Amino acid sequence: MKKILITSLFIFTFILNSLNAQWVQQTSGTTALLKSVSAVSDQICWASGAGVVLRTTDGGATWINALGNIASTFGGSNIWGVDGQTALVTGTISGNAFVYRTSNGGTSWSQVFTQTGGFINSVQLTGGLNGYMMGDPVGNRWSLWNTGTIGLSWDSTGIRLDGTGEASWNNGMMISGSKMWFVTNTATGKIYYSTNSGTTFTAQQTGATSATFGAIWFNYPFQGLASSNGSLFSTSNSGTTWTVVSNAPGGTANIGGITGKNLKWWFTRNTASTSIYTSGDNGTTWSSQTCPSGAYSHISMGRLSTGGTANIWAVGDAGKIIFLSGVVGVEPINSQMPSKYLLEQNYPNPFNPQTNINFSIPKNTFVKLKVFNTTGKLISELVNEYETAGNYSVKFDGSDLSSGIYFYTIESEGFRETKSMMLIK
């Protein structure tokens, strides 16, 4: 996947709209420890924990018990919602790992995986039929499995990674296109990284002095945050190098969840005091957010949010679910609005490997910006979302491409324009 970064040329009111936004507690109907949350959209969200699976399809106004036929002793360590009806949940019963799948909103579940003595930390579907699952080592081999059936069946053929003395953590995996990362408990904060959808892995080091707890998230395939115990680390090169975030607030309590979009980040600390922290400038500055008291273990932003905004849920102890709405929407306050659609020539051109593409839209509208090769094959979809009127800049990275001519096309409400650019390595 190509590296992209979308930056509005306007001054945003994000600080007023998001950094000071208020988290609202929702009624979960349980007092059980909630360990994982998966926000599908602004309305659909799933959560799991100790003997509980929950689902909402109305933005959290009502949460229903979706445990169905799963045993009440089920651990519920990780959940992935596909839509309002389909989800996968992982957990343990009597020391053995189980994965269940529902296609009817949790009324009933089918067992799709089990492993004696195992512990599945994370399961994610990547669109279409495909997905991946990561669990602690069994027999000194990391439990790594893929699916091409939306989680109905799982296969580990050809995937072998030594994990002697290692383990991971709930929700400790991130997938972005063909790239994948998962955290470990090793003393140096080792992160395993794959560029081929989990077929092979290499080790990255955060430089942590100890690691027993971790979370990881990437806003872009190259821009990510990871935690090790109470420390936060950042990368701008897909994890080739990691740098400690020295101004990360909140003390040393464990960081259990990280999420974000564009240049905005949120993370949770497992402490009963203020435990949600955010940045609106890609981690340059951080602030705490007011939220109901609780130790929040995981956080998730709606993946399929529309209209330029997104909602976030966090879950934690005593059945707590808290909600923050409209956090990613941006509002331009620059009075110089463009009068027409415009797609500018990329710069620099020729480029190696990064270039900038500027475009302008005269009204609030849905915008698509795509890159193709000379055969018409889609290389990258840089923009595919609702944008407010304004001027925008998109960074395109061709590190994974060969030298040659490429084309970029913008489409919006009947306007369509294509320009060419040259990559020279």
Image (tube, helix red, strand yellow):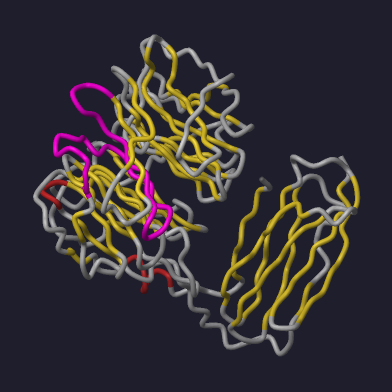
Identify which residue, 50 or 216, lies in the foreground: 50
Which of the image's four quarters has the N terminus?
A: top right
Measuring 24% from the left and 65% from the top, which residue is drawn there?
23
Residue 22 belongs to magenta span:
no
Q: Is residue 362 above or below residue 375?
A: below
**Magenta portion: prevailing SS class:** loop
**Magenta segment range?**
67-96
Residue 92 magenta-highlighted: yes
Quarter in which the C terminus is drawn: top right
Residue at x 48%, y 12% (from the top left corner) = 162
Q: Nearer the viewer, residue 186 or 32?
A: 32
Near-viewer residue (264 or 381): 381
Residue 308 coordinates in the image, percent (x, y): 50, 72
In the rendering, at what x and y percent does residue 99 appear? 34, 35
**Residue at the spot x=44%, y=75% of the render?**
13
Residue drawn 19% across the image and 55% down it: 65
Residue 255 placement: quadrant: top left
* Residue 165 occupies quadrant: top left
- The correct choice, above or below, for 28 with respect to 214 in the image is below
Left or right, residue 377 beside residue 137: right
Up-down: is 118 above or below 294? above
